[in-house]
Image (cartoon, rainbow, N blue to C red):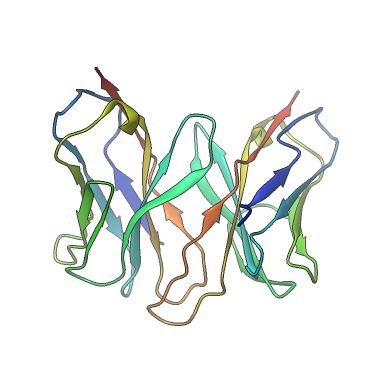
Amino acid sequence: KAGVTQTPRYLIKTRGQQVTLSCSPISGHRSVSWYQQTPGQGLQFLFEYFSETQRNKGNFPGRFSGRQFSNSRSEMNVSTLELGDSALYLCASSLPHGGVSSYNEQFFGPGTRLTVL
Amino acid sequence: GDSVTQMEGPVTLSEEAFLTINCTYTATGYPSLFWYVQYPGEGLQLLLKATKADDKGSNKGFEATYRKETTSFHLEKGSVQVSDSAVYFCALSPSAAGNKLTFGGGTRVLVKP
């Protein structure tokens, strides 16, 4: 079974530009979550999508947005890039959360490393 | 809000030494607890998990026990190998919050031959 794939793997942008990152989940997985990893803030949850709807959202400004398509592939977009947006962006897929006190393992992709100059 | 605190690294060990990484958490309700590992240049991999108090998660010689009374989930391995060199993350997921994970800051472990 193919794992979670993220494209591109590396990206260099300049301040003020916008960027779109893509994530293809494991076949059959319907939930996709996005995380930002930086040396200063560590791993932080951005948002989760399930059945094309945002189900959870972290504490990030509105410049960070995402969407999910009917085939469960997801994209995240960052507009008006700032230097502080330089990070490794990780995508994770899982079967949908089954309810209270249950959990479906999240499988992470290798990440997209974004550098903002 | 929810938070996870784990010991800062780096932790440097010799091969076959005992490894402990402390992790404590703050959360309401009954979260699920996890340890993830990140090898150089790779994404995160789930190492082990525990979903209720007193559960013990184990995998690849690593163990951690969900201690609700001390809100802790310490990771241990009795005999580390060079291949265990990685960054380890403790994380929690609230019981009814979908797949949102809150991570600790990570602990880098370096095992020398």
The quadrant of the picture occupied by the N terminus of chain A is bottom right
Residue at the spot x=41%, y=69% of the render? B94
Question: Residue drawn at (53%, 49%), measured in percent from left and top?
Answer: A44
Quarter of the image with the C terminus of chain A in it: top right
Quarter holding residue A103: bottom left
* Vertical arrangement, residue A94 with respect to residue B7, above or below: below
* In-image side of B70 versus A104 (left or right): left
* Percent x, y of residue A78: 77, 46
Q: Nearer the viewer, residue A83 or B100?
A: B100
Front in this rendered view, residue A18 or A32: A32
| Residue A99: percent from left, percent from top | 47, 82
All told, the count of numbered labels is 0
Identify the image quadrant of residue B27: bottom left
Residue at left offset 86%, top offset 36% = A17
Please give left or right for residue A97 compared with residue A23 in the image: left
**Picture coordinates of residue B65, whole percent (x, y):** 19, 59
Between B19 and B58, the one lying in front of the other is B58
The correct choice, above or below, for B65 with respect to B112 in the image is: below
Q: Residue furthest front?
A: A1
- Residue pushed farthest right? A17
Q: Is residue B23 shown above or below B16?
A: below
